[in-house]
Image (tube, helix red, strand yellow):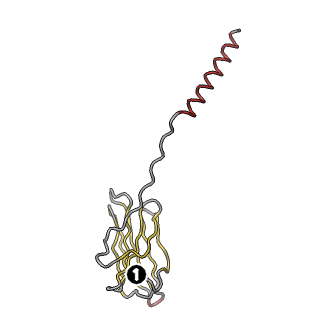
Amino acid sequence: MTFSRRVTVTGAAVFALAGAASVLAPTAAAAPPTAAAAYNGACGSGYSVVNSAPVANEGTVFLTYSPSARANCVVTIRNNPGSSRYMSAVLSTGRGADFRTSRDEGYYTRYAGPVYLTGTSGACVSWFGEIDGQVGGKNNTNCGQN
């Protein structure tokens, strides 16, 4: 076997071993998905979650309702509390002259809100949450079943 053949055979063996090693080598485990935020009871006793929406991968916005108070409440909760970030919680109902809105916004470490609107029984509500420019929520939902 000449020198050039030995190099070719040796090179082919090295590539075959490298290919096998890459197939057999353990791959880096993908990061586990971030757990969605759970409702934290910020709206108070008597309020139950009636709807929710993700705020991208940052958190969850919750719409709650209290039959005794005849009121809705919204709170936006981060998946991973930490340093303060811009957040908001917005709740609105009605149109035109009947339009009402309640809003909380600022830099928070855990959640924005709670914000309340009373007299929403039987009315559609729009509700949103924002975390660092990522928005979640819904327009005109829970009509008559707040």
Q: Residue furthest left?
A: 45
Q: Residue furthest top?
A: 2
* Looking at the image, residue 62 lies above or below residue 96: above
User: Image check: 135 left or right of 86?
Assistant: right
Q: Nearer the viewer, residue 59 or 144?
A: 144
In the picture of the structure, the residue carrying the numbered disc 1 is 101
Q: Nearer the viewer, residue 119 or 33?
A: 33
User: Image check: 70 left or right of 134?
Assistant: left
* Looking at the image, residue 25 lies above or below residue 108: above
Q: Residue at x 36, y 68 (%)?
A: 39
Q: Nearer the viewer, residue 82 or 60?
A: 60
Q: Quadrant of residue 33?
A: bottom left
Query: In the picture, which quadrant includes the C terminus?
Result: bottom left
The kind of secondary structure element at disc 1 is strand
Query: Number of labelled discs?
Result: 1
Q: Residues within 10 Å of mark 1 (few under 14, many from 20)?
A: some
Residue 140 coordinates in the image, percent (x, y): 49, 80
Which three-letter amino acid code belongs to the residue tagged 1?
Answer: Thr
Residue 120 coordinates in the image, percent (x, y): 40, 86
Residue 119 coordinates in the image, percent (x, y): 37, 88
* Looking at the image, residue 104 lies above or below residue 108: below
Residue 1 coordinates in the image, percent (x, y): 71, 9
Q: Residue at x 47, y 43 (%)?
A: 29
